Amino acid sequence: MTGKATRTIHSPRSTIAAERALGGSRGSEASRVPPGGLDGLMQSSTLKHLLVAAESGDAAAQFNLGVLYDSRLDDNGYAIEGNRAEAMKWLLAAAEQGLPRAQSKLAEMYASGRATPEDFIYASAWFLLATANLRGIHRHRARSGYARISLRLTPAQLARAKRLAGNWRPKKSNNTASIRLLEMF
């Protein structure tokens, strides 16, 4: 894979490249998904390259796929049901490799999930990990997310989240990550 589009997908700015390929702009909630929803989206050439890169272990591509699967927009920009399991699969794969934006996004998904104490523990742990390597507004959001979620935890649960974050080490890519929603660490 030596084409220009492939290099763009592999770059740290691959989120921007993927959004531009979709006709959207960075940070725009009005980004449009091609006709056919996510299935149609996955048929586009650029996103096929993104999927290949993600399957080969590229953390930035995995993050972008996770964001796309969680986008919950149809081809007209209207809210639809997203694919949470696929989003979490790809975000977990990127987060496990140490990508801070993926760690923060995964934490947000745990925080907004089933609202179980276990999910809040994992959200807190991922937020703590993300704050260590993020900068600017992204770091602020991760800190705010941690502060919000930590209020729902007991001291013992907070200690467990901190222990999980403290013991965490990045994993090498193993192509696609398995979904481990109950035992991430």
Image (spheres, helix red, strand yellow):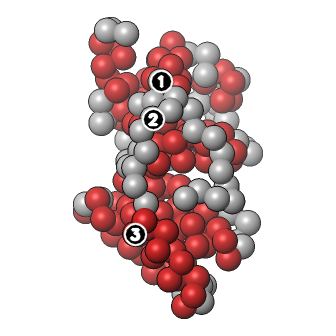
**Mark 3 residue crowding within 10 angstroms, few (<14) / some (14–19) / many (20+):** few
Residue beneath the point at 36% across and 32% down:
14
Q: Looking at the picture, tell me which residue is in the foreground, 136 or 161.
A: 161
The Cα–Cα distance between marks 2 and 1, rounded to whole angstroms, is: 8 Å
**Mark 2 residue crowding within 10 angstroms, few (<14) / some (14–19) / many (20+):** some
Q: Is residue 165 above or below residue 28?
A: below
Q: Nearer the viewer, mark 2 or mark 1?
A: 2
Residue beneath the point at 49% across and 55% down:
105
Q: Amino acid at mark 1?
A: Ser
The residue singled out by tag 1 in the image is 56
Does dot 2 land on a helix, a strand or a loop? loop
Q: Mark 2–mark 1 contact, CB under 8 Å?
A: yes
Does dot 1 land on a helix, a strand or a loop? loop
Q: Earlier in the sequence, mark 2 or mark 3?
A: 3
Q: Earlier in the sequence, mark 3 or mark 1?
A: 1
Q: Nearer the viewer, mark 3 or mark 1?
A: 3
Q: Amino acid at mark 3?
A: Gly
Quarter residue 111 falls in: bottom right
Tag shown at residue 173: 2
Residue 19's spot in the image, x, y percent? 43, 32
- The single residue placed furthest to the left in the displayed view is 136
The residue singled out by tag 3 in the image is 166
Q: Amino acid at mark 2?
A: Ser
Q: Looking at the picture, tell me which residue is in the foreground, 58 or 84.
A: 58
Q: Is residue 153 above or below residue 143?
A: below
Q: Is residue 102 left or right of residue 138?
A: right
Location of the C terminus (image quadrant)? bottom right
The Cα–Cα distance between marks 3 and 1, rounded to whole angstroms, is: 28 Å
Location of the N terminus (image quadrant)? top left
